[in-house]
């Protein structure tokens, strides 16, 4: 149904009813210096017909490219039933289920989601999601500062192998609260955190962030890192790709007692690439810290007749308690994406998730082996990986990616903007959706493009 705004007469009638002459008077408590002087970059209004045409033109620009990019957003096969069910009216238009008696279906689905995520991560508790992976890391940092009563330093050890966008967003959210990130550099041979390089006496710090797999696709030595952090009275924040947990050791089993908080992005679980989103954030933790967890948690109970029921519980948000006691100001979440993820995991089951993860790893191994045979291309790091790997080129990577795009291929993610020391390196990903023919097409094009550039570079310049 089209949106029909209030008429000017209706607006004046409402303002008169509350004794106000204009809408701006409702915001007079905001100091004039803080008010926007105008929205200069907002384009002029358009008619419905013009907007429809514009969106069709933009949609047409999203051509179906052969994608070998990852870096936090992955192309997995999504069974048709997932979004057929997710977009049913019961889920598609459902709001926050404050009225339990009218929202048992939504509440049960969210409860099932929490159960699945707790099982997948090996943790005690899951919340009913956050905004995305980057903001979930920021919330995990804030949660660790609240939960770690042994530390007052507000120092967070943040490896450079954590996704650069995650680090940037987390810094933006927490740095005004006196929390500092101290970077841990990575080993240049393995692309991982070298446990032996960590200081024996690091001083007091609140938490260590451990990505698994890390941004380079490499696997970290999570057991040693977790034990090292706990030996120094610090909490462990795990940043994970949930799909990898189908075959990798879950964070709840890292080290002697497991990680303390787990976060990440749920996009691999049934969310399409969709030109960049929306996605949703995951968060799980040990039972000891459940009252410090942000967002919302769904609980299961029984009514007076002994029937099973579900309800919102532990809502430590600013709408429900004093702001000074709230764990976050998260007002909603990506509920629709959580619905898709729950249906996706239900359809796939443990065996299906394992098959997807194994096939993704196998395809990346094939890609890695074939790409390493191309003249002028070499694998950059020697660590085991999940379904991403870094390759170094003898020719400019940006030129290679441009020429690949001309062939309808998204060649990967250039690392030069994030890691200057890896300026001619490309992060490449393959999932279960890539066939042997896809891999051959990619490798053949890279070989042709790189070879042409090498030949051009070797050509003598005759004046």
Image (tube, grey):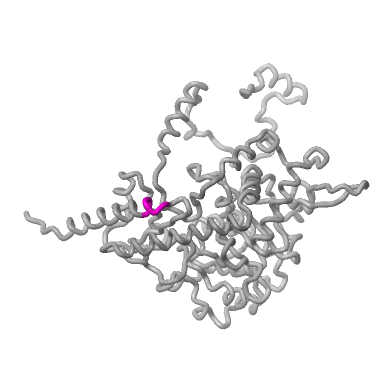
Secondary structure mostly taken by the magenta-highlighted segment of the chain: helix
Task: Say whether residue 124 is left or right of residue 453.
Answer: right
Question: Residue 223, percent across and down?
Answer: 59, 75
Judge whether residue 417 is colored magenta.
Answer: no
Q: Foreground: 441 or 224?
A: 441
Q: Which residues are magenta?
A: 435-439
Q: Foreground: 52 or 385?
A: 385
Q: Residue furthest bottom?
A: 200
Rendered residue at 49%/63% (across/down): 386
Residue 153 seen in render:
no
| Position of the N terminus by quadrant | top right
Question: Residue 178, percent across and down?
Answer: 62, 63
Total labels: the figure holds: 0
Rendered residue at 37%/54% (across/down): 439
Residue 332 image-quadrant placement: top right
Rendered residue at 48%/26% (across/down): 44
Residue 154 image-quadrant placement: bottom right
Task: Say whether residue 268 is left or right of residue 401.
Answer: right
Question: Residue 366, percent across and down?
Answer: 40, 61
Q: Residue furthest right?
A: 304
Q: Is residue 438 above or below residue 195?
A: above
Q: Foreground: 461 or 369?
A: 369
Rendered residue at 57%/72% (across/down): 222
Residue 326 seen in render:
yes
| Position of the C terminus by quadrant | bottom left
Q: Foreground: 376 or 45?
A: 376
Q: Residue furthest left?
A: 463
Question: Residue 128, percent across and down?
Answer: 69, 51
């Amino acid at each position: 149904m089209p949106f029909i705004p209030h008429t000017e007469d209706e607006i004046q009638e409402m303002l008169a009813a509350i004794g106000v002459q204009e809408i701006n008077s409702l915001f007079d408590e905001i100091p004039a210096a803080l008010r926007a002087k105008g929205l200069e970059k907002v384009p002029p209004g358009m008619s419905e017909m013009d907007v429809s045409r514009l969106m069709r033109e933009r949609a047409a620009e999203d051509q179906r490219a052969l994608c070998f990019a990852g870096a936090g957003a992955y192309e997995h096969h999504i069974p048709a039933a997932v979004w057929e069910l997710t977009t049913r009216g019961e889920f598609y238009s459902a709001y926050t289920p404050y009225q339990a008696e009218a929202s048992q279906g939504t509440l049960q689905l969210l409860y099932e989601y929490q159960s699945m995520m707790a099982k997948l991560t090996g943790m005690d508790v899951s919340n009913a999601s956050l905004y995305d992976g980057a903001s979930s890391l920021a919330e995990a940092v804030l949660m660790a500062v609240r939960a770690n009563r042994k530390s007052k330093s507000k120092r967070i050890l943040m490896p450079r192998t954590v996704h650069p966008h995650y680090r940037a967003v987390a810094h933006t959210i927490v740095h005004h609260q006196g929390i500092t990130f101290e970077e841990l550099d990575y080993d240049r041979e393995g692309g991982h955190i070298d446990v032996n390089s960590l200081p024996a006496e690091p001083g007091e710090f609140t938490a260590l962030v451990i990505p698994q797999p890390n941004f380079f696709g490499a696997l970290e030595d999570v057991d040693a890192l977790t034990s090292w952090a706990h030996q120094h009275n610090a909490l462990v924040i795990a940043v994970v790709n949930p799909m990898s947990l189908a075959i990798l050791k879950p964070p709840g089993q890292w080290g002697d007692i497991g990680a303390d908080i787990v976060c990440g992005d749920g996009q691999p679980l049934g969310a399409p690439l969709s030109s960049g989103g929306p996605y949703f954030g995951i968060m799980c933790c040990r039972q000891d810290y459940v009252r410090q967890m942000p967002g919302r948690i769904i609980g299961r109970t029984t009514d007076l007749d002994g029937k099973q029921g579900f309800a919102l519980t532990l809502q430590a948000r600013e709408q429900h308690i004093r702001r000074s006691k709230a764990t976050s100001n998260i007002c909603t979440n990506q509920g629709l994406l959580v619905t898709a993820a729950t249906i996706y995991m239900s359809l796939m089951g443990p065996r299906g998730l394992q098959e997807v993860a194994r096939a993704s790893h196998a395809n990346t191994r094939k890609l890695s082996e074939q790409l390493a045979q191309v003249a002028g291309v070499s694998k950059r790091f020697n660590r085991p990986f999940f379904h991403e790997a870094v390759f170094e080129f003898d020719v400019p990577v940006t030129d290679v990616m441009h020429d690949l795009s001309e062939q309808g291929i998204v060649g990967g993610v250039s690392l030069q903007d994030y890691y200057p020391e890896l300026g001619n390196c490309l992060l490449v990903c393959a999932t279960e959706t890539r066939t042997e023919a896809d891999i051959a097409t990619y490798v053949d094009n890279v070989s042709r493009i790189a070879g042409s550039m090498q030949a051009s570079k070797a050509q003598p310049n005759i004046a």
